[in-house]
């Protein structure tokens, strides 16, 4: 038996260390979060995507009485961005959440399905997508989606 150790790097940073466009993503994401439709969980998630052409596309979670029919903020944003600009790679995605009348203290991490969707977008354009998880007390980021989803499912060979 052989043990295989997987390595991934998580970076912590301060707000002041974000670039100008990343700071703009924070602003946009905080603004759009009010558009979340989350009457079942009362957990409001925002995802703002920065494209290579400088456009910013944002999404929020959209729930449904038939729970599994709802969709996370990340997938709403990524699908919308890829639908509107099908030839433009995504550079960065920033995610944050709001609950109990305040923005979360610590970052929330995208679910498995969102990671899989983000990864497809990263591979489709052969361009790393930086993933920034933003919260009041902590900002962390991953340099690419691959780092967030080891042993991902790829195309059927
Ligand atoms: N949710 C997201 O939008 N993104 C995540 O990364 C995790 C969870 C949503 C789904 C659901 O509407 C609510 O948060 C509670 O799970």
Image (cartoon, rainbow, N blue to C red):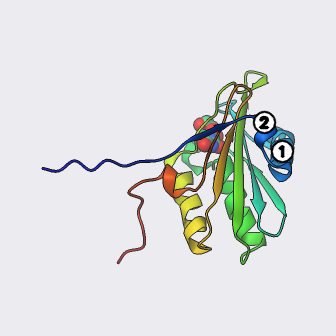
**Side (left or right) of 35 relative to 73:** right
| Position in image of residue 23 (x %, y %) | 83, 45
Indicate the quadrant of ligand 1 in the picture. Answer: top right
Work out whether 60 lies above or below 123: above
Q: Answer few, some or many: residues within 10 Å of disc 1's Cα (few below 14, many 20 plus, some between 14 and 19).
A: some
x and y, in percent, of residue 5 in the image: 31, 47
Q: Mark 2 or mark 1, which is nearer the start of the sequence?
A: 2
Label 2 crowd (10 A; few <14 / some 14-19 / many >=20): some
Task: Judge whether 96 appears above or below 52 on screen.
Answer: above
Q: In which quadrant will I find the C terminus?
A: bottom left
Marks 1/2 in contact by CB < 8 Å: the verdict is yes
The label shown at residue 119 is: none
Mark 2 CB lies closer than 8 A to ligand 1 = no
Asked whether residue 64 appears in the rendered view, the answer is: no
Residue wearing tag 1: 23
Q: Mark 2 = which residue?
A: 15
Label 1 residue SS: helix
Provide the secondary structure element on which disc 2 rests: helix
Q: Is residue 97 above or below residue 143?
A: above
């Amino acid at each position: 038996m052989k043990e295989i150790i997987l390595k991934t790097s998580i970076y912590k940073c301060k707000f002041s260390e974000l670039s100008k466009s990343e700071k703009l993503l924070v602003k946009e994401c905080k603004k759009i979060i009010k558009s979340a439709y989350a009457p079942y969980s009362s957990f409001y998630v925002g995802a703002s995507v920065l494209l290579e052409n400088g456009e910013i596309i944002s999404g929020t979670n959209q729930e449904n009485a038939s729970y599994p029919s709802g969709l996370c903020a990340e997938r709403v944003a990524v699908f919308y961005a890829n639908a509107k600009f099908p030839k433009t790679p995504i550079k960065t995605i920033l995610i944050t959440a709001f609950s109990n009348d305040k923005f979360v203290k610590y970052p929330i991490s995208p679910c498995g399905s969102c990671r899989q969707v983000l990864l497809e977008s990263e591979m489709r354009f052969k361009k790393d997508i930086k993933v920034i998880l933003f919260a009041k007390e902590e900002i962390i980021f991953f340099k690419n989606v691959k780092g967030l989803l080891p042993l991902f499912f790829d195309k059927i060979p």
